[in-house]
Structure formats: C-alpha cells, structure tokens
Image (cartoon, rainbow, N blue to C red):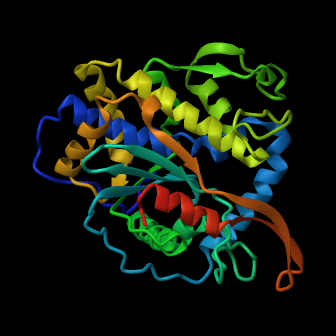
Amino acid sequence: MIRSKRRRRRSRRRRKSPETLFWVLLLSVLALGAAGFVAHNLLFATEQAAEAEWDQVLTDAVGADDIEAPGWEPREPADHTNILLLGLDNQGMSDLIMILSYHMKTYDSTLISLKRDIFVSGQDWASKDSGQDHLAWAHNRGMGPEKDYHAGARLTAQTVEDLLGIDLHAYATISFDGFTQLVDLIGGVEIEVAPEFALREGGALPTGLQRLEGSQALVYARHRQNPRIPEEGSTSQAGDRVLRNQRLLKAILEQCKTLGTDELLFIVGQLDDKVCTTMEDWDILDMANVLYNRDPGEIETVILPGEGERVYQERIDSEMYYYFLNFEETDIILRELELK
C-alpha cells in the first residue's frame, strides 16, 4: 500500500450514494486492472532473476537527479471530460495508462489505452543514460525521492497532453496491492478464459466461462509468458494483454453493479484511501451518474495504434524496446471521438 505524501481527497463528509460508490469502485477497478502485472512477477520463480535486475535499474533511477514536475492543472471540460487513469507498480511506474472519456450531454463513453512502452522523444527518465524514454517512467520521475504521487501524476498528465494534443480534466492513480482483495470483495468476476490458459506455465487457469477469484484474475490480467495467447481483435502480442485487461475491467464493472449499497460502502472503506485524485465528491457524483445506469459493454474501447521496435541507442551502446505511436492514425481516432 502506498503511504506517501499523496494528498487524499477531503471535502464535506456526505453519505455517498450508490452511484458515487460505484464511481469510486470504477476508478479503483480501471487503475488496478493491469497494475498487478509487476506484482505478479513475484509469483514465478522463472522470472526472479529478471525481476532482480529490473529492480536494480529502478533503484538506480530513484537516486537520479530530480525532475521538476510541471505546473499542470486540471482543465475545465467543454463537450467531453477526459480522466487520466494510472495503475502504479511499487516503484511508482505506470503499468496501466488509460483515459476515460465521456460526452457531457450524450454520455457516450470511451476507454483509451496507451501502451506503457510508448516512446517519448527527448526524455531519459531512468538512471543517467539508461535509455529509458518510455511513457511508463514519467510518473516515477515526476514524484521524485519525496514520493509525491500528485507530482508524478502531473508530469504524466502533461506528457500525455503533449503527446496526444488533447486536454485532460482530472487524474486518478492507484497502486496494485489491493487488486486481488478488490476482486475477492466483490465476489469474483465472470469471464471467458481462453483454452491456452490451461497450458500456462507456473499457474494454469480453468478455461471456458469462469468465475475467477482475486489471485486468478491477477494471473489473467498479468499473463505475458508462453504460451502467447491470442485475443480476438489483437494485432500484436502486446495488444493481446491490453485487450484482455479491457475485458477484465468490464467484467469487474458488471459484478460491481450487482452489489447493494451496504456492500459497496464496505468495499469503498477498504479502497478509498488508496486513490490519489484531483476530483472532489461532487465531480465524482456527476460522473457516476453517467455510467452507473449504463451497460459496461457499451463503453467503447480503443488502443492507440503504433508499432513496437527494438532500437539501438548509441549513448548506452545497447538496444531498447519502444512502442512508437502512429501519430497520424492516433489523430484520426481522437478526431472521430471528437476529442480534437
């Protein structure tokens, strides 16, 4: 659990309505859905060596020179409200990056996924000359050694705005440590598990339509080992994981809508202190009304297009994997969604 200098939302204490409670869960679910990826590495002995090496890179990064977070502030929405959602690992890196966008009159809603490996030109956010110019590093570098999670979210928000050329109106971040607890508290999630999960090394899952408990849902969200499991609509191996995560989030939302007010109150009590956000209670209530009475299946999902490539970097004499955003196609998508 993150116990940092993050400032929790504080406002006049009101008894939250079911819609507000649902929205708090929504933020938790969306941010937690893929954020278990890094935590789940610890469950597999075959990945321990790689994990130790990666942790050392992260440790070195925390000790690097500070990067001043920009003075990003939430903008006032016009037709659409765009909320940046970040799922953070235990080093404050963004393992999940999504934008929840909804139209303020029609209530049409979209989940826009950004790959964590997106290349950000002109950055070196990890340890000195490491070559880590990935979008996932923005939050880690923004929060600095003081572990200021608001500063990390501001740097990420500013970076995403600059990348996409759109306005963001709020952010919400959460760590991964409550993911399995959340799924267990809501009674598990029902989802179609691909047959290949029965062949999975280090933790097979029952296949077909299943109700997964928290630890199983974490395996489903995290999977990136052999066998590679294709998903309908995927155009890449990385896309498989993102699509799977989106489907898991919708399944969790479906389950949340079956719960009563007392149950929601209890769950919110377990998770509310883990959410770092710019939104006040009334903002949350307004947006909850958009989604509470809508079918989660109606939420459009988008993965911003691009191509992964390993690139030699002379300054570190090594290759790095980056996901290069296709800005032309991305611009078309954002314009079709009326966000530009």
Residue shown at 82% from the left, 27% from the top: 200
Of residues 203 and 71, the one drawn nearer to the viewer in this rendering? 71
Image side of residue 201 versus residue 38, left or right: right
Q: Residue at x 10, y 49 (%)?
A: 12
Q: Where 70 falls versus 198 (above or below)?
A: below
Q: Residue 123 at x, y = what percent? A: 64, 80
Instruction: State the image coordinates of residue 104 (x, y, percent, origin top left).
Output: 26, 51
Residue 232 in view in this figure = yes
Q: Is residue 320 above or below residue 42?
A: below
**Image spot of residue 244 (x, y percent):** 64, 35
Q: Nearer the viewer, residue 270 or 338?
A: 338
Report the number of discs.
Answer: 0
Q: Is residue 318 left or right of residue 25?
A: right
Q: Is the C terminus in the top left, top right, bottom left or bottom right quadrant? A: bottom left
Q: In front here: 16 or 308?
A: 308
Left or right side of 219 for 277? left
Please report the residue visible at 44 percent of the width from the left and 78 percent of the height from the top: 69
Residue 144 can be seen, yes or no: no
Based on the displayed image, in which of its 4 quarters is residue 309 positioned? Answer: bottom right
Residue 128, given in percent of the width and then of the height, sits at 70, 82
Residue found 13% across the figure and 35% down from its top: 15
* Quarter residue 20 falls in: top left
Q: Is residue 24 above or below residue 217?
A: below
